């Protein structure tokens, strides 16, 4: 049972780390777009973005086109705030990894606590119930 706790910890750690990495990469990509200035080829940038290239492998052509169109509309709407977002990325990326560290600490404490609790449960002797014969 203890092994299961640590396997679950490893899987959750991988998911947590992958999510933080994706968020940091998207932040860096957004900062690069902000550094490009006001004239950005949104269709080209969205089509070449790492998340969209990954989605292209998993989605049908029609669904991929809808997702790509939605991303273009979203980025065009955010276009005015993109320079502000680009400057915010200088401190948002470190904050992402600080939050990741706290999350990993919490996961480690939970897994360690479960490990200790399971160790105590198996070492306690079984007490006979009041109505059972001895």
Image (spheres, rainbow, N blue to C red):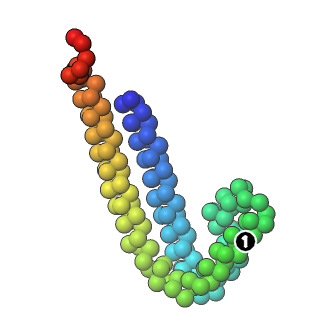
- Which residue occupies 31% across, 38% down? 114
- Under circle 1, the secondary element is helix
Where on the picture, by quarter, is residue 118?
Answer: top left
Of 105 and 119, the residue lying toward us: 119
Of 8 and 22, the residue lying toward us: 8
Where is residue 78? Give x, y as percent: 56, 83
What residue sits right under mark 1 in the picture?
Answer: 66
- Which residue occupies 62% across, 84% down? 76
Q: Quadrant of the C terminus?
A: top left
Residue lying furthest front: 131
Circle 1 crowding by C-alpha within 10 Å: few under 14, some 14–19, many from 20: few
Q: How many marks?
A: 1
Where is residue 54? Give x, y as percent: 66, 58
Where on the picture, by quarter, is residue 37?
Answer: bottom right
Residue lying furthest right: 61
Where is residue 61? Give x, y as percent: 79, 63
Where is residue 18? Give x, y as percent: 50, 53
Query: Where is 122 relative to 16, above or below?
Result: above
* 29 lies left or right of 73: left
- Which residue occupies 39% across, 36% down? 5
Q: Quadrant of the N terminus?
A: top left
Residue 57 appears in the figure: yes
Of 94 and 114, the residue lying toward us: 114
* 121 lies left or right of 73: left
Query: Where is 1 relative to 25, above or below?
Result: above
- Which residue occupies 47% across, 43% down? 11
């Amino acid at each position: 049972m203890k092994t299961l706790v640590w396997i679950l910890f490893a899987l959750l750690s991988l998911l947590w780390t992958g999510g933080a990495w994706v968020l940091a990469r998207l932040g860096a990509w957004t900062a690069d777009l902000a550094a490009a200035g006001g004239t950005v080829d949104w269709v080209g940038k969205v089509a070449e973005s790492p998340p969209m290239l990954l989605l292209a492998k998993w989605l049908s052509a029609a669904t991929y086109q809808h997702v790509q169109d939605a991303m273009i509309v979203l980025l065009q709407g955010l276009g005015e705030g993109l320079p502000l977002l680009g400057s915010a990325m200088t401190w948002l990326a470190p904050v992402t990894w600080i939050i990741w560290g706290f999350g990993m600490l919490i996961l480690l404490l939970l897994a360690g606590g479960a490990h200790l609790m399971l160790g105590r449960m198996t070492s306690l002797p079984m007490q006979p119930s009041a109505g059972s014969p001895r």
